[in-house]
Image (tube, grey):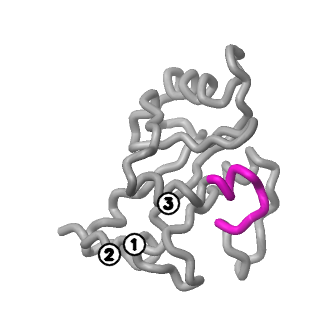
Amino acid sequence: MALTQSESQAYTMSGEANPVRPTQICMADLNVRTPPISESLSRLEHPLIAEAQRLPDTHAAGGVERILTLKDRVWFKVKTRRWRGAATRLPEADHIDASPEVRQAPWWLGAAGYRREGDPSDFYSALATTWDREGSSSDR
């Protein structure tokens, strides 16, 4: 059974509505330090993390761009300046039996890198290459 729209948009304990949190891999990609437990991951100072905070509203308005090369779950593009990212919303967060932790943290920025148009090291090109080579077994 799925939650209603208002239930799935509940505020977290920190008072943030639908924050997008970077994973440890993403923080390493961005060269961002792991903060103390008292600091919100979604408020870390980096342009891509800041831009990712717009994703839940953009998603609700139907304005997101999917990363079609990734097949393990639905991933969305996050772009700002030279930075590129891959973010997802955990579908299990919509289930009535989802744990409070999952419901409070449905959005995650999973990986990040640079835009390098036409270069194999471009973030989205490299992500597609990694997926083609390793599939869902990759930790990237």
* Residue mark closest to the camera, 3 vs 1: 1
Cβ–Cβ below 8 Å for labels 2 and 1?
Answer: yes
Residue visible at 47% across and 34% down in the picture? 67
Distance from the alpha carbon under mark 2 to that under mark 3:
16 Å
18 up-or-down from 31: above or below: below
Q: Position of residue 137 (x, y in %)?
A: 49, 36
Residue visible at 52% across and 54% down in the picture? 55
Residue type pointed to by label 2? Ser
**Residue hosting label 1:** 9
**Residue hosting label 3:** 107
**Residue hosting label 2:** 6
Query: Is tag 2's residue or tag 3's residue first in the polypeptide sequence?
Result: 2
Q: Is residue 50 magenta?
A: yes
19 and 58: which is toward the camera: 58
- Label 2 packing within 10 angstroms: few (<14), some (14-19), many (20+): few
Residue type pointed to by label 1? Gln
Q: Position of residue 63 (x, y in %)?
A: 43, 45
Residue 103, picture quadrant:
bottom left
Cβ–Cβ below 8 Å for labels 3 and 1?
Answer: no
Q: Is residue 35 left or right of residue 110?
A: right
